[in-house]
Image: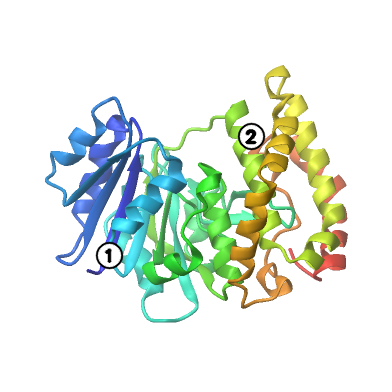
Amino acid sequence: MNISVIVVTYNSRAYIRRCIESILGQLGRDDELIVVDCGSTDGTPEVAESYGLAQVIRTTNRGYAGGNNLGAAAAQGAYLVFLNPDTHLRPGALAALVAPLRGDGPDALSTACVVHMRQPSVVNACGNTLHIAGLAYCRGANQQAALYRASAEVDAVSGAAFGVRRAVFAQLGGFDEQFFMYVEDTDLSWRARLAGYRVRYAADAVVEHDYRVSYSPRKAFYLDHNRHIMLLKNLGRRAYLRLLPALLAAEVITWGYMLMQGPRFWLVKPQVYAALLAERRSIRARRRAAQALRQAPDHAVMAGFAVHLDFQQLAGAAISRAAAAVFDPFFSAARRMAIGGGR
């Protein structure tokens, strides 16, 4: 088996036909499509089964991480491709996404050029950019896709559409299921970098995504909770201590952002801290597993991580410029103190 495409669904009936049809048109004789349905009540698995797929796996709602791990466990292909159900592959995208992974070179993960389905000339994510404080954001978001025609090494994959060698995915232990949803793609990428691998942006693998911006206290909780776990797992002790000023500054920023969102968000940060305290034993165990992968020092792993925070993805341009003027010099100094140099 060559390529295994895995799509996790949850009440995805509105999208799944378009997604499946774009995949089936690009599968070779030795490829497979696996749909993992996490308890849909809108008929999504029945739609998937109507295509006569080899595998439609029905399960409870295990989240993005758990659903994709289940699909990966059933996969037979040498290369795994993970797609959101609200994506659509442009012609040639599947082959272009897998191309950087062939052979045994350091490029073990690849991420697509994900564009907005309603504005196909505009970028949703050309991979993810990772800030030294663990805050991740979409690389190239809302810019013209024509500006991102060159393939490049990037910090992290975008979970909407990416590929990975199956052997490497197994070596890394798959997705961290305690994340449930959000940040799991960035965490997987970080662990891959710890193990000495690279993440490649595949510019010719163009995928349309019916992306809609949404924000809720639940989403805010998972984003912040999972960011903290990622840092605690993947940073070496010395690097973590040296980055404490930057991490504390990030706490000030995230506290401020939650307060600005209104009363519904005011308890998010205390809930995150309480959850981290309750999960401390599990976090320690997962940290040991992550550090056991280490083939690269922190300064090499974080060599490309950003010091500029793209506040414009969260707020307006004016706020972004003001925040950058205040925080960018601080983060730059903190990074030089911790590991030296950087964007």
Q: Which residue is mark 2?
A: 221
User: Which residue: 65% across, 60% down?
Assistant: 287
Q: Closer to the camera: disc 1 or disc 2?
A: 2
The residue under label 1 is 3
Q: Quadrant of residue 242?
A: bottom right
Q: How many marks do you count on the picture?
A: 2
Q: Secondary structure at mark 2?
A: helix
- Which picture quadrant has residue 27? bottom left
Please report whichever mark, 1 or 2, sits nearer to the chain's N-terminal start. Answer: 1
Q: Amino acid at mark 2?
A: Phe
| Position of the C terminus by quadrant | bottom right
Q: Residues within 10 Å of mark 1 (few under 14, many from 20)?
A: many
Q: Residue furthest bottom?
A: 104
Q: The N terminus lies in which quarter of the figure?
A: bottom left
> Which percent across, then down, holds residue 202?
44, 65
The image's mark for residue 78 is none
What amino acid is at disc 1?
Ile
Is residue 283 visible in this depiction of the protein?
A: yes
Left or right, residue 323 beside residue 153:
right
Mark 1 touching mark 2, by CB under 8 A?
Answer: no
Q: Is residue 328 visible?
A: no
Give above or below for 136 relative to 12.
below
